Image (cartoon, rainbow, N blue to C red):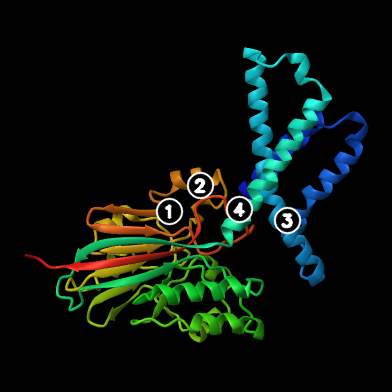
Amino acid sequence: MFRTILALSYLIPNIYLFLRLWQFYIPKKHRAWYSVIYAILFIIYPLTRFAGRNTPAALMQILETTSNYLLPFFLYLFLFVLLSDILLLINSIVRIVPAELTRERSLRFSILLVIMSLSVVVVTAGIINFNTIRTSEYRIEVPGKSSGATGIRIAFVSDFHIEESTPKWFVEKFVNCIGELEPDLMLFGGDIIESYDGDENMEPFERLIGSIKTTYGVYGVLGNHEHYSPQGKRSFFSRAGIEILADSVVMIDSSLFLAGRHDSHTRTRKSIEELMSTIPDSLPVILMDHRPTEIDLISRTSADVVFSGHTHHGQLFPINLITNRVYELSHGYMKKGETHFFVSSGIRLWGPPVRTTAKSEIMVVDITFTRAD
């Protein structure tokens, strides 16, 4: 079903885009060349998806890089063409611009130039936004119960999707940012690693992540991408110093309980009631759950703070409008009942390295443990 939706989402807008450009913007004498060029660009993404393992690595890299930037370019070209068609339709009714003028080739060429330029500008801005790490800071209070601590500073990131092609400079920048923030606890909210073959190309990432120092350690949960090809990934987490919580709970310095859930891909995943029933009601409870899908249920448990990711907040406008409808909280912070929920838009992404919604973020949450009067 997912692949069908993905294919239709690519095919239908491209059919519309091809026909509208052909009909309204491309002179008849250039339509043959236009058709050939458009067909070549259109086929690159399917070729990348279905290329076999025997495809030369250099060619595969070219195809993947090209398709990664073509996809968002096609998206925004489609949206701007659609917008221009809507404006032309409105103009045909209210007649602000004479109909004769809209048929002039020079005006149509100018509109096409503007549409193409705007698409390039949006994608370029999205590339810059994607490669810029930003910090989102929050301050909350939760009941301290019998905790001996007065509070804790937590740094949380999700959806790193680390693989061999991940720029080393980006991971270095991330680690430096964490060092400057000086968190007491570092949390990874799933989809930490995309692929892992255990070779030397991943060693720099293991070393960099492993250099993160906090008072209480580094913990994480698994996301859906860890389950797509799980072979060898456990060794990455071990070498990178990330302790994975999978339907398990640890006590942090007799100050709080930290729990982590399996991703919903795992059929044996405990229900939230089962997991929370194992935690004594004597300390604050921090919960990591890769997908923010059971907010109502979790809000009725003893969890004080919940960290999730997965949504990427849609990554590209207007997909964020869809994630806003699918998830009660697609990005940011909300309090429901007595539980504080945080959903990160991700430190990086899967797919096109372009982000036009939200930001590549590190969430920093300063939690104060309050005392009953």
- Residue in the picture at 78% in, 14% down: 100
- Residue in the picture at 63% in, 56% down: 127
As drawn, the label of residue 331 is: 1
Element on which disc 4 rests = helix
- Mark 3 residue crowding within 10 angstroms, few (<14) / some (14–19) / many (20+): many
- Give the vertical position of 318 relative to 150 (above or below): above
- Mark 2 residue crowding within 10 angstroms, few (<14) / some (14–19) / many (20+): many
Q: Which residue is denoted by mark 3 in the rendering? A: 67
In contact (CB < 8 Å): disc 2 and disc 1: yes
Eye-nearest disc, 4 or 3: 4
The spot of residue 357 in percent (x, y) is: 53, 50
In contact (CB < 8 Å): disc 4 and disc 1: no
In contact (CB < 8 Å): disc 3 and disc 1: no
- For badge 4, the amino acid type reads Gly
- For badge 1, the amino acid type reads His
Q: Earlier in the sequence, mark 2 or mark 4?
A: 4
Element on which disc 1 rests = loop
Taking depth in this image into account, of 121 and 66 the one nearest to the observer is: 121
The spot of residue 261 in percent (x, y) is: 38, 69
- Residue in the picture at 78% in, 33% down: 21
- For badge 3, the amino acid type reads Ser
Taking depth in this image into account, of 97 and 253 the one nearest to the observer is: 97
Q: Which residue is denoted by mark 4 in the rendering? A: 126
- Using the rendered view, name the quadrant where residue 370 is placed: bottom left
Q: Which residue is denoted by mark 2 in the rendering? A: 320
- Mark 1 residue crowding within 10 angstroms, few (<14) / some (14–19) / many (20+): many
Q: Earlier in the sequence, mark 2 or mark 1?
A: 2
- Give the vertical position of 159 relative to 204 (above or below): above
Q: Earlier in the sequence, mark 3 or mark 1?
A: 3
Element on which disc 2 rests = helix
Eye-nearest disc, 2 or 4: 4
